[in-house]
Amino acid sequence: MSLFYLFAALFLLGTILLGLVRVLRGPGSGDRMLAAQLFGTTGVTILLLLSLALEESALVDVALVFALLAVVAAVAFVRQHGLPEPPDTPTHRQQPESAKPKEPNDDR
Amino acid sequence: MNALLVLFDLVLLAGIVGVAWRCLASTDLFRAVVLFITFGLLLALAWVRLEAPDIALAEAAIGAGITGALLLVTLERLRSIMAERRSGRPHTPPPDPAGPHALLRALHDPPPERRTFIPALTFALVVGGLLATALWHQPQSVGLEPVVDAHMDVSGVDHPVTAVLLNFRAYDTFLELAIVLIALLGAWSLGRHDLIPARPAPGPILPGTLRLLVPVAIVTGVYVLWAGSHAPGGAFQAGAILGAAGILLVLARPHQLPMAPGVPLRLGITAGVALFLLVGVYGLAAGHGFLGYAEAWAYPLIILIEVAATLSIALTLVALFVAGRPAGDDA
């Protein structure tokens, strides 16, 4: 069974290398960032598979931390590229009310 | 199974070298940042394969979470600084923010010279050659593993890495903590910086993510700290996870949060180094040597130091991310 896990991990590593094409080509920033996020998900899976194949339970913790913190980069990206720009220059963006959300915010 | 592992290692190695090369050669800084995030992921896998799950844990926390966000925010600030600088000069056209090469050209002012290629290549070859000769003449030894294993019963903890870090070689860890503190002092001495502005996010996804993730991150951080006494984990990893949770809050807060008060913040940031030093000096006075513990006290002292260090590391990472002294404490 561990042979199967290893094979699956190798296959997933291959998909990461294939996915690098999206990072290198783009074209948009969003494409690149999303590719990196999906690498994070794949990385979690690889770590879990390796932990089963090599029988190292500590790798589950590494996978947990990865799953938890991969989102930090995505949040940093979304803040800058996905949110409406405040009207002022970057040094005086202290009025969050002026940057109204464009989409309806119905459920809160 | 072994052949498959070797194949896995080879593919991983090729991926690491390829990603590092494309990251350094990239003319588009955003692409370089994304490649660096990917590099961190592959590096964590490499640490796993090198049977160093402790370092893989730290790399996962710092490489996947904190560095990526730090670089993205830095890039954005760099863009706005460059745009301001350009707009101050009437003769140069403002850089196109969408153009991939505009920022790099703005950064290299004057542009890089072709002539630097030969010296750079020579330097790389010389350093590479020196490293190769150093590796070639490795002495035959089994390393320190048997020595550490023989003394595990007096270390106070069950995990050899923690025993080395906080007991046998506590001095190194103490200096590492001091370096983290000095890095923050350096950043603060550069003056005050505008906070990353709070911006309301459209839709429920970002606030919902925050509400779910931050408590889970705190629980995970405490778990990793606790796990450090008997399994991979410890203060640096736990501090990085808690710091990442703090950075998440700084990044995604919809409203301005009140600034942390100056004195408690400074106490928290220095707690790790101060407590470590205190324990070290006490050990010296009690006759165990600097940073030595009495055997019965080793476990509680190590846990105490680790808790303080975790708090300090987490606070320092967030403070480094915010960059600049907190406003309003010039006293």
Image: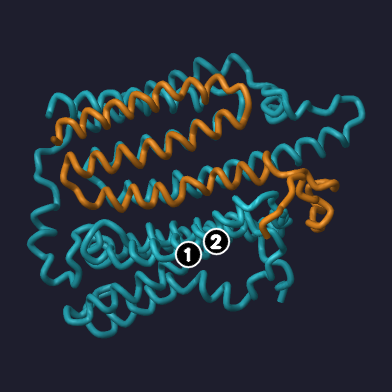
Chain colours: A orange, B cyan
Which quadrant would the C terminus of chain B be assigned to in this image? bottom right
- Residue appearing at x 64%, y 39% in the figure: B75
Q: Is residue B305 left or right of residue A68?
A: left
Where B162 falls versus B261 (above or below)? above
- Residue appearing at x 81%, y 57% in the figure: A97
Nearest the eye: B199 or B263 = B199
- Amino acid type of the residue that numbered disc 2 sits on in the rendered structure: Arg
Q: Is residue A64 left or right of residue A23?
A: left
Q: Position of residue A5 (x, y in %)?
A: 21, 34
Question: On residue B250, which mark appears?
Answer: none
- Residue appearing at x 30%, y 59% in the figure: B233
Residue picked out by circle 2: B211
Q: What subunit carries mark 2?
A: B
Q: Is residue B155 left or right of residue B118?
A: left
Q: Are marks 1 and 2 in contact (CB under 8 Å)?
A: yes
Q: Position of residue B279 (x, y in %)?
A: 33, 78
- Residue appearing at x 25%, y 62% in the figure: B162
Q: Position of residue B213 (x, y in %)?
A: 49, 57
- Give the secondary structure at mark 2: helix
Nearest the eye: B150 or B182 = B150
Neighbour class for label 1 at 10 Å: few (<14), some, many (≥20)? few
Q: How many marks?
A: 2
